[in-house]
Image: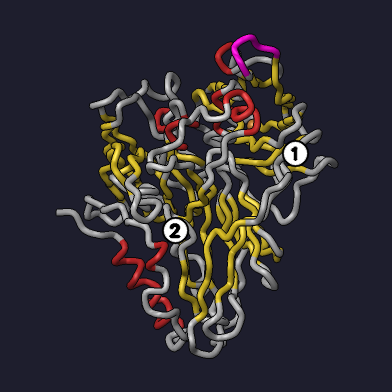
Amino acid sequence: MPYERPLFLFVSPLLAAAALGCAADRPSQPEGWDSAVALRPALDRDARPEVVEVDLTARVEEVEIVPGKRTPTWTYDGGLPGPLIRARVGDRVIVNFRNELPAPTTIHWHGIRLLAAMDGAPGHSQPETPPGGGFTYDFVVPDAGLYWYHPHVDSAVQAGNGLYGPLLVEDPSEPAGLGDELVLVLSDISLRDDGTLEDPQVGGNLGTLFGREGDLLLVNGRVNPVIEARAGLRQRWRIVNAAKSRYYQLMIADHRFTRIGGDGGLLERPVTTDRILLTPGERADVLVVPRGAPGSTLPVRWVPYDRGYGATFGRPEVEAFRLRLAAEPAAEDAPLPEVGRDIPALDTAAATRVDLKLTQQESPGGVEMGINGVPSWEAEPLVAAVGETSVWTVENTMDFDHPFHLHGFFFQVLGADGEPVRPMEWKDTVNVPVDGAARFAVRYDNRPGMWMFHCHILDHAEAGMMGMLHVIQ
Ligand SMILES: [Cu+2]
C-alpha cells in the first residue's frame, strides 16, 4: 500500500521542538504561505523507513505554464518540474523508471555518490532506455543535500523540454529551527505564441555558442509565483539551478542572504552575501529573513551575470518570484542555531594532476566544442585508480564561462595558491570563468567505473564539451 513519506516531515520538527522545550511557540508563516511553489511529492511505496521506492514515468503531457496556454511538455509524472523525492542520509532509493517519451533517455542523479552502474551515463553505466522501456535505479544516498535528476541523452533538448526534478536528502541530526523550508527548482523555457515549446535549435550556431536561455523564468514550473511571508521569520531556501544554460543570480533589495550549504551539503561555516549565484547544475542552501512594511512585496530579482560576451548587454533584470509580507507586524525569530561542520582538506601532497583546457575547434559541421581540442565523440578516457587523490586544473580558452561538472565525486575547490577556498564545501559543479581556470582536489573513493565530466551549459556539452574518467580498481 503506498503511503506518503512527508508525514514524518510534519511530525519530526514538532517532536524535535517539544523535546528541546523551545521554539514551540515560534510564530508561523501565513497559512498556505508556500502553496504557489508547492512541489508534488513522490509517493514512497515502501513501508520500510530506510527505503524510499518511487515510480517515475517520463512522458509528454500538456502543462499550463502560461495561463490559458497548453504546452506539450516533456515531464516526469506529468508535471513541471518532476516530483520531489525525499530521503534521509543513508536511505536506499529505488526508482522504477518508465520511458513513455518518443525518444530514448536515461536518468542521471546529479551529485549523488552512487555506483557507476546507476549514474545514467548512456553507453557506460547503462544502455539508453528506449521508448516503451524501463530501468530500475537502486542506490544509497550517503550525503545530505539537495540533488536533482535529469536525462543524460540529448540533454539540451530533453532537459530543455522540461525533464528535471529535485531529490532532497535530509539529515535528521541537523539543528532544528534553521528556517521554514522551501525547495526551489529554478529553470527557464521558451514558448511560441501558440504555447508550444520553442525549437531546441533556435538561433543556430550562435544559439549553441552562447547557450540557449529560455525567455520565461520558472520557479518550480511557475512564472513569477508569490510566496506569502511573515516579516522577521527566517526562511530556508534549498535551490537548484536546473536551467540548461541560464546562470541564476538572485538579489532582494536591502536584504542579505546567509548561505549555509552548497552542492554537497553544509558549508564549514555560514557566509553572508547580497546575492546568490548559481550556474546550471549548482545548488545553494540559503537563509533569508524578509523585512519590510506589513502588506508590502519584495521582488526576488534575477540580475544579469556577465558570463561572457553579450551576456549582460541590453538585458534587464527580471522578477523571478516575489515575497508578499503578511499584514501582521514583523515577528521576532529565535537566534540562528550554530550550523556548519568540519570538512578536512584533502591531502594533495602526493596528488596526481589532471590538466584540461575547455576549447572550441574549427569544424565544418557547425559549432564544435571540446576538451583539450577534442570533442566528446573522439575523446579517450582519462584513467585514475581507486584511492587516488588528484588535482584538476580546468582552463578556459573561450570567451564564455563554463560550469564544469564531474559525475560521481565531490571535490574541494582550490585557490590559485593551491589552498582550499574558505569556507570549505563539497562541490560537484564549479564555474570556470572567461580567461581563467578552476582548480579542485578530488579523491576517488571505492566506486570504480566510467564517470563523465562536462560543461553544464547543456548546449555546450552536446556540442562536444564532455569527457570521461575511467576509475579502475
Ligand atoms: Cu560551456
- Left or right? Give the position of 324 relative to 210: left
Q: Which mark is residue 170?
A: 2
Q: Nearer the viewer, residue 317 or 362?
A: 317
Q: At label 1, which amino acid type do we have?
A: Pro
User: Which contiguous range is marked in magenta?
Assistant: 362-366
Is residue 344 visible in the rendered structure shown here? Answer: no
Check disc 1: other Cα within 10 Å, few if <14, some if 14-19, many if 20+.
many
Tell me if 78 is positioned left or right of 191 in this view: left
Q: Is mark 2 within 8 Å of ligand 1?
A: no
Question: Which of the 4 image quarters holds residue 459?
Answer: top right
Residue 345 rendering spot, x and y as whole percentages: 71, 47
Q: Which residue is rendered at x = 25% and y = 60% of the image?
A: 4
Q: Residue at x 40, y 65 (%)?
A: 36
Q: Is residue 363 above or below residue 454?
A: above
Residue at 29%, 57% in the rendered image: 49
The residue type indicated by label 2 comes to Glu
Magenta-drawn stretch contains 364: yes
| Residue picked out by circle 1 | 433
Residue 86 spot, x, y in % from top left: 37, 55
Q: Which mark is residue 18?
A: none
Is 324 drawn above or below residue 283 in the view shown?
A: below
